Amino acid sequence: METPSSSSSASAAASASDADPGAPVREALASLARRYQHLLDRSTPFVRERWFGLFGLALLYLLRVWLVEGFYIVTYGLGIYSLGQLVGFLSPMVDPEIQELIDGSAPSLPTRSTDEFRPFVRRLPEFKFWHALARAFCIAFVMTFFSVFDVPVFWPILLFYFCVLFFVTMKRQVQHMVKYKYVPFSFGKQRYGGKRGSATEDVSLMKD
């Protein structure tokens, strides 16, 4: 037998769905977004596997473009976007040039054994860099199935433009690294032999 409370709740839910017909769609999208985020969180520790998967996706996209012999403007846009993400990946979170203009001092990584260890903090973390590239390659791959994006262009010109832009951008990035003395990779805190020597001396004193 149906109770008055259950009937009232069912009628309230029915009235709410009638009032907002887009609510089920939003709930389904929110559930899909939560599942997608859960998969991303689980894939975070698998760095090598993620990048191998991205490499395979890039080869699949290039094979698709080579077979259809088109979509060069999409590939050019994908290359420009990937280059911008690479610059963010190689750049520090705090730009030394801007900080030097603000307070007159630029941060740098330690160059002597007595300096304090400060790991390199990227403006674009590794996981976000990988996720941005993977998402861009997936979108570009889907775009190759729609002829509206196949704009006829002379692809050697686009390739030449991209090579020149890549060379100029990387040259400026390397000059920035040399000027402010930082390396965009951290290999962990360096260990020195002084600690080991002191421990040996402590053991010899205990024996005496």
Image (cartoon, grey):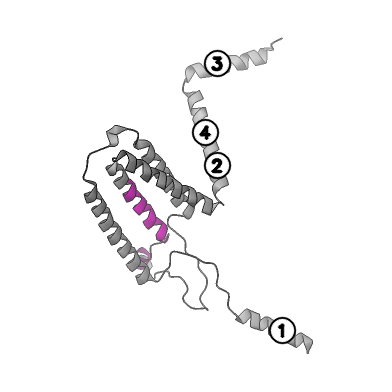
Kindly indicate whether the residue at mark 1 contacts the one at mark 4 (C-beta within 8 angstroms): no
Question: What number is the disc on residue 39?
Answer: 2
**Picture coordinates of residue 98, whole percent (x, y):** 35, 63
In the image, residue 110 lies in the stretch drawn in magenta: no
Circle 2: is it few (<14), some (14-19), or many (20+) Cα within 10 Å?
few
Which residue in the structure is indicated by mark 4? 32
Say what amino acid the circle numbered 4 marks.
Leu
Q: Position of residue 197 (x, y in %)?
A: 65, 83
Judging from the image, what secondary structure is the residue with disc 2 in? helix
Asked if labels 3 and 4 touch by Cβ distance under 8 angstroms, the answer is no
Which one is earlier in the sequence, the residue at label 3 or at label 1? 3
**Circles 4 and 2: CB atoms closer than 8 Å:** no
Magenta segment, which residues?
78-100
Q: Callout 1: 10 Å neighbours few (<14), some, many (20+)?
A: few
Between disc 1 and disc 2, whose residue precedes? 2
Camera-side residue of 156 and 122: 156
As shown in the figure, which amino acid type bears the numbered disc 3? Ala
Q: Nearer the viewer, mark 2 or mark 3?
A: 2
**Image quadrant where residue 69 sits:** top left
Look at mark 1 in the image and give the residue it sits on.
Answer: 202
Q: Calculate the distance from the C-alpha at mark 4 to the C-alpha at mark 3.
A: 23 Å
What residue would you read off at disc 3? 14
